[in-house]
Image (tube, rainbow, N blue to C red):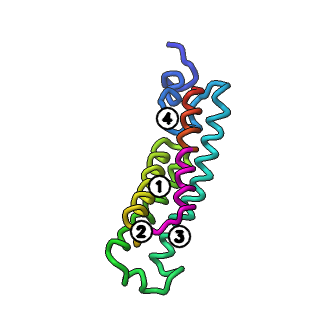
Amino acid sequence: MPRNGNNGMPHDAARDYLSDRIEERQPAPAAMRWGFILTWFMRVLAIIWIMKGLSSWAVILGIWTPIGQFEARSTGYQATIIYFALIDLIAAVGLWMASTWGGIMWLLAVMSHLILAAFFPGIVSSGILTIVFFLTLIAVYIAVSWLAAQEE
């Protein structure tokens, strides 16, 4: 039996799986442009969402507010801050990895923020500039994702 140098493993078995990470896919030469832009857009979003998640933790830990003020707030407020402290950082990790689930978690996080800001402005306060900024980020993400998918 001839040996192929990979100790009996089928050739390229490790590379035959389909990864959900954008940067691990083998793109066509033309797909490099939009895939590259999507990866770096997701990484910039990851940095922004890390800061957003850490700001929620700062509220919980009493860094930006007097200690004890978080515990004195309503249960709805506490649940919302804890939700964003977790989901924003999870989304940021997925975005940094340029993973499909990262984009989905980010869309869930940003849509949660927009919906809560619309229906519960006392808990999640967002100005018109924040809402426009988030909607612009969503539009850019969808457009760049679509363009990257079209080139593949």
Give the mark, 4 or 3, whose residue is nearer the N terminus.
4
Label 3 sits on residue: 55
Q: Residue 25 appears in which quarter of the rendering?
A: top right
Residue for badge 1: 110
Q: Which residue is mark 4?
A: 19
Cα separation, mark 4 vs mark 2, equals: 40 Å
Label 3 SS: helix
| Residue 23 on the magenta span | no
Q: Which mark is residue 120?
A: none
Q: Which residue is mark 2?
A: 121
Q: Where are the magenta residues, as a range?
A: 124-139
Amino acid of disc 2: Pro
Q: Main secondary structure of the magenta part?
A: helix
Q: Residue at x 50, y 66 (%)?
A: 126
Eye-nearest disc, 3 or 2: 2
Quick check: marks 3 and 1 in contact, CB under 8 Å? no
Above or below for 101 versus 11: below
Q: Residue at 56%, 27% (x, y): give it.
A: 150
Whether residues under marks 4 and 2 lie with C-beta atoms below 8 angstroms apart, the answer is: no
Quote the CA–CA distance across marks 1 and 4: 25 Å
Left or right of residue 101, residue 78 in this image? left
Query: Outermost residue, left direction?
Result: 75
Three-letter residue code for mark 3: Ser
**Marks 2/1: CA–CA distance:** 15 Å
As shown in the figure, which amino acid type bears the numbered disc 1? Answer: Val
